[in-house]
């Protein structure tokens, strides 16, 4: 993304729609893990809490990756061909 404002907007939108629900999912996963049995089967509690924790980690990773990709510094494009030099024929 070339526009700095668009980069900031994309990061804010991903934080609102992915980061905050990810944090909520992590908190709910921890609560389900440490509270008493919620379902009749203890395996269901474990699978439910693990799935919430995994979803939370994935949702938190999305804004981090978006921020890193949009705000990284790109090297300038170099052109080795001068405007006066003719283009070589394809080989």
Image: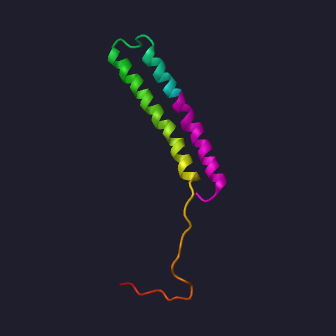
Left or right? Give the position of 38 relative to 69: left
Question: Which residue occupies 35% across, 11% down?
Answer: 40
Q: Quadrant of the C terminus?
A: bottom left
- Residue 59, given in percent of the width and then of the height, sits at 49, 36
Question: Which residue occupies 61% across, 59% down?
Answer: 2
Q: Quadrant of residue 18?
A: top right
What sort of colour scheme is used for the picture?
Answer: rainbow
Does residue 88 lie above or below 53 as drawn? Answer: below
Q: Quadrant of the N terminus?
A: bottom right
Does residue 38 lie above or below 63 as drawn? Answer: above
- The question of residue 51 being in magenta is answered with no
- The question of residue 7 being in magenta is answered with yes
Question: Which residue occupies 57% across, 37% down?
Answer: 17
Left or right? Give the position of 17 relative to 58: right
Question: Which residue occupies 53% across, 30% down?
Answer: 23
Q: Main secondary structure of the magenta part?
A: helix
Magenta range is: 1-23
Name, please, the residue furthest toward the right. Answer: 5
């Amino acid at each position: 993304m070339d526009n700095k404002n668009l980069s900031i907007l994309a990061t804010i939108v991903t934080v609102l729609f992915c980061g905050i629900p990810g944090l909520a999912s992590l908190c709910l996963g921890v609560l389900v893990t440490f509270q008493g049995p919620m379902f009749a089967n203890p395996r269901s509690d474990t699978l439910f809490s693990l799935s919430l924790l995994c979803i939370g980690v994935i949702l938190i990773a999305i804004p981090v990756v978006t921020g890193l990709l949009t705000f990284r510094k790109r090297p300038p494009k170099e052109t080795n061909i001068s405007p006066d030099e003719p283009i070589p024929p394809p080989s």
